[in-house]
Amino acid sequence: MMMHTTLTQLRSLKLDGLATGLEEQLAQPGMAALSFEERVALLVDREVHARNDRKLARLLKNARLKYGQAAIEDIDSRAGRGIDRREVMSLALGDWVNAGHSILITGPTGAGKSWLACALAQYVCRRGYSAIYQRVPRMQEELRIRHGSGTFGKWLLQLAKTDVLVLDDWGMGAIDSMTRSDLLEIIDDRAANKATIITSQLPVEHWHAWIGDATIADAILDRIMQRNHRFTLTGESLRTEQSKTSKKEEKTTPS
């Protein structure tokens, strides 16, 4: 009865990992051979892991990554793809998030730009940092809605506090003057303080023309280019490769 009360109190205090660990210890007769200090250490370790798991789940949910299962350990670094696994791992394990660096990923459609961006963002979440994924083509409409509803300022503050912002499909489609100004606000809040990942089919040297307004373009690019890491992906579209593989499997599968 006393143990049941203790377990209930632990869960009411949101110490679910510790409560679960205690239940497991009670079910294992061998635990009696351990000292009090050893059993407490195991319980605390279980609670720490449970909290870390909950934090990671929350960070990934808030990030809303396009490819939530993308992981840097699964990077396809075959010859001709333009990806150096050692370079990516060195960057991922480095201090680029705290240093507020930009990562610029360019290449043709289907080359895996969005996947690589999501893999890097997923890894920073595993390290305890926050991330948010945004597709630039959709942002224009979202910005209009937020301006109209009066929530733009609050949303801008949320982005400014986020450790890593992923701006996917940068340079895809024209943008209006309001979006240019908003992008400047977003980038300016992050300059030298928060990390940003940008993916684009356009080579970096064409970004100035895409932004349109020379003054705003100069301001945005000056902030993005201060401290950046670049990846230029190449090779055949991965979507085309996957389609070919699927067709081959269909042909070899007996009816």
Image (cartoon, rainbow, N blue to C red):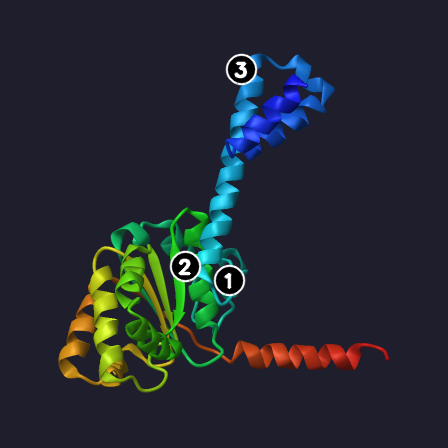
Q: Give the position of the N terminus as an image quadrant.
A: top right
Indicate which disc, 2 or 3, sits on the residue closer to the N terminus: 3
- Residue 229 lies, in percent from the top left, at 30, 63
| Quadrant holding the C terminus | bottom right
| Vertical comparison of 66 with 52: above or below | below
Question: How many angstroms separate mark 2 from mark 1 (CA)?
Answer: 9 Å
Circle 1 residue: 75
Tell me which numbered mark, 2 or 1, is placed earlier along the sequence. 1
Select label 1 or label 3 by which is in front. Answer: 3
Q: What element carries label 3?
A: helix
Location of mark 2 (residue): 88
CA gap, disc 1 and disc 3: 43 Å
Q: Mark 3 sits on what residue?
A: 37
Most extreme residue toward the left is 215
**Up-down: is 176 above or below 135?**
below
Q: In this view, does 55 lie above or below 16?
A: below
Label 2 secondary element: helix
Per the image, label 1 sits on a secondary structure element best described as loop
Place of residue 105 in the rendered image (x, y in percent of width and height, measured from the top left): 37, 70
- The disc labelled 3 sits on which kind of residue? Glu
> At x 52% / y 29%, what residue is drawn?
45
Which amino acid type is shown beneath numbered disc 2?
Val
Q: How far across and down, in percent of the image, does residue 213 sit?
A: 18, 84
The reply, left or right, for residue 219 in relation to residue 242 is left
The amino acid pointed to by label 1 is Ile
Dots 2, 1 in contact, CB < 8 A: yes
Query: Dot 2, how many residues are within 10 Å of its Cα: few (below 14), some (14-19), or many (20+)?
Result: some
> Is residue 141 found left or right of 240 in the rendered image?
left
